[in-house]
Image (cartoon, rainbow, N blue to C red):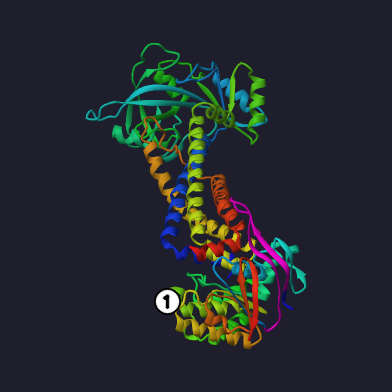
Amino acid sequence: MNALAYAWRSLVRQPARAVLGVLGVAAVGALLFDMLLLSEGLVLSMRDLLDRTGYDIRVTAGDPGRDAGPLIDEAAAVAAAVSAQPSVRSAITVRLADARLAGASSAVRPRRAFLQGIGGEGGRPWTRRRGRDPMGTLEVVLNDEGVRALGVEIGSEVTVSVSSCSGNEEAPPPVTFRVVGVVTFPFDSPDDITAGLTAAGLADACGTDDHGVAHAVMVASRGDAARAAADISTLRPDLRVLTTDEALGAFQEQGFSYFRQISTVLTTVTVSFALLLIAVLLTVSVNQRLGEIAALRALGFSRRRVVADVLCESALTVGIGGGLSLPLGALLAVWLDSILKRMPEIPTELHFFVYHSDALLVHVSLLAATALLAALYPMATVARLPIAATLRNEVVS
Amino acid sequence: MIVRADDISRVFAMPAGPVVAVRNVSLGIGPGDYVAISGPSGCGKSTLLHMLGCVDTPSSGTLLFDQHDVSCMSDYARSLVRLRHIGFVFQRFFLLPMLTAWENVELPQAEAGVPRSERRARTGELLAYVGLASRADHRPSQLSGGEMQRVAIARALANRPRLVLADEPTGELDRSTGQQIAALLDRINADGTALVIVTHDSALAEHARRLLTMRDGRVEEEGGR
């Protein structure tokens, strides 16, 4: 019987203690797994959303801050010049505006909406689900919430009343657009209505004839975003150029760092708890069996062997508990994610807990280290056990 | 000679000062010997037994096992000597409660690297030898005290030791069961294994061919029959 089989028998011998240990590790391991998913989850999810636009560089006239930011004059010309760079595959202009949208039915009240006016030849920064992208000036695509809330479908008309549009201080008259498609915008919140138009369509809705201005130029590189960004900066040093990596880096330094700090603190606490739990259980188990262990040593079992028995017992407890912690942690992550996503203005597709292989690797490594560290004291107890004195004490007691 | 002690002593450092458990004992155990060590509690019997079994080492003097100085052996080397050449029987049996009688007897063989088929044959043979073939699948908690001690004896014999050491092997048993164990030990000795037993039980001690009486760590008297 090898050390692992012996350790298994030792665990099964005291099922209540074994179950307590395994469930403790499973609970702690689930929390640990979730903390690891949380530490990088938001950044990974944000990257995924940014990637879904199909563009990996954003060019703006300044820091967007909390609003759309300043306009880029002659953005269409900028996009054309950027597109001509060898490192760039395509570029589009994006102009943003707030509006109220109304369907044909007077029974449905107008709703606040965000407008995205897209210019240029590249792909649209949304995912088309039905219909087609807007091509004519008076065509629009809506997200699901827009279609549902306004009671419209493809082919219906919606009236767009722009309430806030950079470049025009006066409220322009309403303009009627025809719905040509239903799309998903990556950063939509559950109750957001977002509409996509052509740049010319948004200019009409804004009551201006300046089709060329935009809040941003979105650029798709040919694979090397850093090089493309450098080329654009050289071309237009007056503009701010941010790759997806840089944008995420900036996010991480600001708001996202809180999640990482919380995750680090909670990870440390959960690992410490697991360490103490296993160390206590193993120490109690070893102390209950000192006579048996001394007898095994007297029978010729080496010090290495009895130490291996303890280590295997620790590894089994942590291994089984750790195995259970993964599905438990996954279920817990789904639940916690749904709670956090109830916060206002959180995009529907943004997740706080995101699986990544590094999390699994760190989880397994931390639990393995925990099993080893937790077993250190009981292993030392067994290794230093004085055989003769222990046998004598067992008889006397 | 299997084991030879020349003028060995064992001193324990205690908070109140050193305690000499065994003083200047010299003796030899040869193949087929049957030695009983008796004496009052605390006279050093078990300490001497532990030294003879390479569980403990003398503070002074020389202890040779198969002509090798035990004090010069590493812990691992002494473990190997115990595993391959010495069998231990304890007063409290110390069977592993989660293992069956069969597994308890098989365990030291597995540790010694005996092949599986040989282990099976040897374990079956030993359980039959101690009269417990029918209780092979029973755990210690399902056995009586006498049966547990017989399993422990079978375990001590598992790796065909040349020397079996028994510390109060009948200490936890009633008189009748003790006599059965004494008879079993006689058989083991008759089959060629050297035996050293520590006992308060004069009836058991009478089975030995040599009787050492200890007092205050010294062998006061050595007799034979």
Q: Residue furthest left?
A: A107
Which residues are drawn in magenta? B4-32
Q: Nearer the viewer, residue B221 or B51?
A: B221
Would residue A124 be visible to someone looking at this image? no
Q: Is residue A295 magenta?
A: no
Residue occupying image coordinates x 30% and y 32%:
A150
**Res. A296 image quadrant:** bottom right
Query: What kind of residue is marked 1?
Result: Gln
Locate residue A370, reporting x and y percent: 55, 49
Locate residue A303, reporting x and y percent: 64, 61
Q: Nearer the viewer, residue A77 or A334?
A: A334
Placement of B202 over or under B94, stated as above or below? below
Locate residue A75, reporting x and y percent: 55, 20
Q: Residue furthest right?
A: B67
Residue occupying image coordinates x 27% and y 29%:
A104
Locate residue A196, reporting x and y percent: 43, 30
**To which residue does mark 1 refer?**
B142
Q: Mark 1: which secondary structure?
A: helix
Badge 1 sits on which subunit? B
Left or right of A174 on screen, residue A312: right
Left or right of B142 on screen, residue B216: right
Residue occupying image coordinates x 62% and y 82%:
B117
Placement of A201 over or under A49, stated as above or below? above
Q: Nearer the viewer, residue B156 or A160?
A: B156
Would residue B169 be visible to someone looking at this image? yes
Q: Is residue B12 magenta?
A: yes
Quadrant containing the N terminus of chain B in the rendered view: bottom right
Quadrant containing the C terminus of chain B in the rendered view: bottom right
